[in-house]
Amino acid sequence: MEQKQTINFGAGPAKLPQSVLLQAQKELLNYSGLGISVLEMSHRSADFNKIINKSESLLRELLDIPDNYKVLFLQGGGSGQFSAVPLNLIGLKEDRCADYLVTGTWSAKAAKEAEKYGKVNIVHPKLESYTKIPDPSSWTLNPSASYVYYCCNETVHGVEYNFTPETNGVVLISDMSSNFLSRPIDVSKFGLIFAGAQKNIGSAGVTVVIVREDLLGHALKECPIVLDYKVQAEMNSLYNTPPCFSVYIMRLVLEWIKNNGGSAAMETLNKQKSSMIYEIIDSSNGFYVCPVDPSCRSRMNVPFHVGKKEGDDALEKKFLEGASKRGMISLKGHRSVGGMRTSLYNAVTLEDTAALADYMKVFLKEHQL
Ligand code: PLP
């Protein structure tokens, strides 16, 4: 059966809740009776202040963020934070040294960027492939490191931490760009968390940074002022023009998350959705193959090959064509790993996932030898 509606399984920018898009459409030309669009609104206006403050209070509520943390809305994406983190925090201790866990493309890029500003210690033996998280017993953490950094969900490889690394008191930093608000977290365990909005909480352009207050004011003198957490915290993220419309869209998405049960409800749904796909992969007798160790398979991004372990090119092409006929898009894996990848962020519904699961079963029946 062909479906008319398009289902977006993209890794980001990604599907937004329908109700959010409808509200943004409704308010596009005339926001809240003001006669102008948020796109035209001054970031210094009282009305925009209400939008940015509401985004912050929703985030604080949804993640139960303790009072001694600042919430910043910055530009430059997750990649901007790969630089901002060392620029602000590698000087926390004299040695200018930081510990990095490298479990995929994004943490590898972050570590490379940090090398420009200090010493980087990769705390575990180098991985042959990004398909597992090295056992914590094999990590060599440096007690004089300024911080320990990891990427909580590696979007390209589909590797997700289901535990919070133990750092013996050293400041812990996490890139949660692709699993932010997909499950509850204990913010108090972290010195800093950052997340680009374009996967689970909105559109591209704004990056959320949650940072403990005592970590402000340690930036290297080379740190560009727009990336200086202390400056941005003091100015309520308004040192320069913020991505106003992205902050507004984020506010709508956060309201949607709240109205749909918050991060705990998101976690329940995300577990259900990802299990649906992994179960088909695991019961396909090797027709579908997910290379990631079951202990750290991501609930957000599920990479898989079709036909055999390293993927059968012709079958994978056919799989994508068939999916497209059913309105399912953006299932092609990241160019660096090939194969398929389905992203199951918060806005992807159980029904969307069931449609993909149905298709995978039909395709399996038709093509399994
Ligand atoms: N971190 C993670 C986990 C990502 O998935 C991405 C992008 O997909 C980034 C960082 C980089 O984000 P940006 O493209 O916004 O710089």
Image: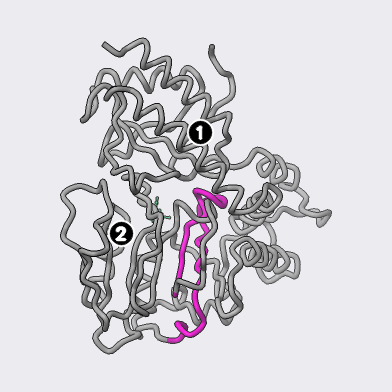
User: In the rendering, at what x and y percent does residue 94 appear?
Assistant: 27, 89
Mark 1, mark 2: which one is toward the viewer? 2
**Residue 225 placement: quadrant:** bottom left
User: Which residue does the image show at 33% across and 42% down from the upper left?
Assistant: 294
Assign the C terminus to one quadrant of the image.
top left
Q: Quadrant of ligand 1?
A: bottom left
Which numbered disc flags the more N-terminal residue, 1 or 2?
Answer: 1
Assign the N terminus to one quadrant of the image.
top right
According to the image, label 1 marks what residue?
A: 8
Which residue type carries mark 1? Answer: Asn
In the rendered view, would you say 248 is above or below 310?
below
Distance (Cα) linking label 1 and label 2:
26 Å
Q: Secondary structure at mark 1?
A: strand
**Residue 251 placement: quadrant:** bottom right
Crowd tier of the residue under label 1, counting other residues whose Cα lies within 10 Å: few below 14, some 14–19, many 20 or above: many
User: In the rendering, at what x and y percent does residue 208 appear?
Assistant: 52, 64
User: Which residue does the image show at 36% across and 20% down from the upper left?
Assistant: 319
Q: Is residue 276 left or right of residue 144?
A: right
User: Which residue does the image show at 40% across and 63% down from the upper left?
Assistant: 164
Q: Which mark is residue 107?
A: 2
Q: Nearer the viewer, residue 342 or 207?
A: 342
Which residue type carries mark 2? Answer: Ser
Report the span colored magenta: 191-217
Q: Nearer the viewer, residue 338 or 300?
A: 300
User: In the rendering, at what x and y percent does residue 246 appear?
Assistant: 59, 55
For residue 215: magenta?
yes
Q: Nearer the viewer, residue 332 or 159?
A: 159
User: In the rendering, at what x and y percent does residue 339 appear?
Assistant: 29, 31
Q: Which mark is residue 116?
A: none
Crowd tier of the residue under label 2, counting other residues whose Cα lies within 10 Å: few below 14, some 14–19, many 20 or above: many
In the rendered view, would you say 45 is above or below 262?
below
